[in-house]
Image (tube, grey):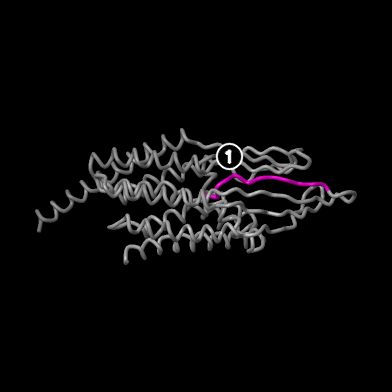
């Protein structure tokens, strides 16, 4: 019973973290809290459609669009919290509790109605209805996939190194996104909201390609963010990974794999059109090559740094004992 409740707690904790972050992002964007189910649906991989009309001053013009981008700043913290709470013994029972609770949560989430918001466009004010689709199937696939991965990893050698480096992969981009959001919010709250949602995506996929009259730059060139990410990866791996030659290889492979998967999930697109004439087309391309190379090098460098640090500590201890 205790392990089942631990699984329930994992889903509840992850859902609470995601909901809180979604609420903060919406507050920064000055959007109604009623859009929180839509943000959670997108974070779980569910579809989001946009419909409405534009008041041009003459006749109303139909507007339609789709959002197919996973807000990594919301999704990744939920996954990390879920894994941290779920990890331990008797994972099968914990996973069962987590999946059962997630099914109930997703069923409730899928009943959310669309929310209409007023959006100022160059062509005139638009009443835009944001309609979340069903997140039951993609959400369950995420929960089952993460829980199954935890069960498999728990039975592998060097499981601690694999688990830690896998969690580091999404955590570092999210931390960078949060820092960017805080800095941006002091200047323009709406930019802080966008950075909170998609700042982590920008680290992994680069600057978005944007077309149409509403296009523009959401983020600065990602080169600086990527340099910061590489440094953080090396530092975090050096701190959390136990020093050994085998751990160096394991950390490199697991970090590279997890980072490439995270980069793939961070990609997607947003489209908005009037009479099928594009107003906005945003495309985030996954930087899989960069992710693989960065993960492999950062994992190796961090592990080697940990090994050097450990050897230096041992030499210092020997000297202290010799002079003691």
> Which type of secondary structure does the marked residue at label 1 adopt?
strand
Q: Is residue 149 left or right of residue 89?
A: right
Quarter placement of the C terminus: bottom left
Q: Is residue 235 visible?
A: no
Q: Is residue 190 left or right of residue 159?
A: right
Q: Is residue 56 left or right of residue 271?
A: right
Residue at (38% x, 55% y) in the render: 83
Quarter placement of the N terminus: bottom left
Residue at (49% x, 63% y) in the render: 16
Region rendered in magenta: 61-72
Q: Examine the rendered structure and indicate whether residue 1 appears above or below residue 143.
A: below
Q: Position of residue 89 (x, y in %)?
A: 27, 57
Q: Position of residue 111 (x, y in %)?
A: 60, 59
Q: Is residue 133 visible?
A: yes
Q: Position of residue 169 (x, y in %)?
A: 41, 46
Q: Residue furthest right?
A: 58
Determine the main secondary structure of the stretch shown in magenta: strand
Which residue is denoted by mark 1 in the rendering? 284
Residue 182: name its quadrant: bottom right
Q: Residue furthest top?
A: 289
Q: Position of residue 211 (x, y in %)?
A: 69, 37
For the residue pair 146 and 263, the one nearer the viewer reads as: 146
For the residue pair 114 and 189, the one nearer the viewer reads as: 114
For the residue pair 30 and 207, the one nearer the viewer reads as: 30
Q: Decide: few, some or many residues near mark 1? Use Cα within 10 Å; few <14, some 14-19, many ≥20.
A: many
Instruction: Say if the magenta span includes residue 84.
Output: no
């Amino acid at each position: 019973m205790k392990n089942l409740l631990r699984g329930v707690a994992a889903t509840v904790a992850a859902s609470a973290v995601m909901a809180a972050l979604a609420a903060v992002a919406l507050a920064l964007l000055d959007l109604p809290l009623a859009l929180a189910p839509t943000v959670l649906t997108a974070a779980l991989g569910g579809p989001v459609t946009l419909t409405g009309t534009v008041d041009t001053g003459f006749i109303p013009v139909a507007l339609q669009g789709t959002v197919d981008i996973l807000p990594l700043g919301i999704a990744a913290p939920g996954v990390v919290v879920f894994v941290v709470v779920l990890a331990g013994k008797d994972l099968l029972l914990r996973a069962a509790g987590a999946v059962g609770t997630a099914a109930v949560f997703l069923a409730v989430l899928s009943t959310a109605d669309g929310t209409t918001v007023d959006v100022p466009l160059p062509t005139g004010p638009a009443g835009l209805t944001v309609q979340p689709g069903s997140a039951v199937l993609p959400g369950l696939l995420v929960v089952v996939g993460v829980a199954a991965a935890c069960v498999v990893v728990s039975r592998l050698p060097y499981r601690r190194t694999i688990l830690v480096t896998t969690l580091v992969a999404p955590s570092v981009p999210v931390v960078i996104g949060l820092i960017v959001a805080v800095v941006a919010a002091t200047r323009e709250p709406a930019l802080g909201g966008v950075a909170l949602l998609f700042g982590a995506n920008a680290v992994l996929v680069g600057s978005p390609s944007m077309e149409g009259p509403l296009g523009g730059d959401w983020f600065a060139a990602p080169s600086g963010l990527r340099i910061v990410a590489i440094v953080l990866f090396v530092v975090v791996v050096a701190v959390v990974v136990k020093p050994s030659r085998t751990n160096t290889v394991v950390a490199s492979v697991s970090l590279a794999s997890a980072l490439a998967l995270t980069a793939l999930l961070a990609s997607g697109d947003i489209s908005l059109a009037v009479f099928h004439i594009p107003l906005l087309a945003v495309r985030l391309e996954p930087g899989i090559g960069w992710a693989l190379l960065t993960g492999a090098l950062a994992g190796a460098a961090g592990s080697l740094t940990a090994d050097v640090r450990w050897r230096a500590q041992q030499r210092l201890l020997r000297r202290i004992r010799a002079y003691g």
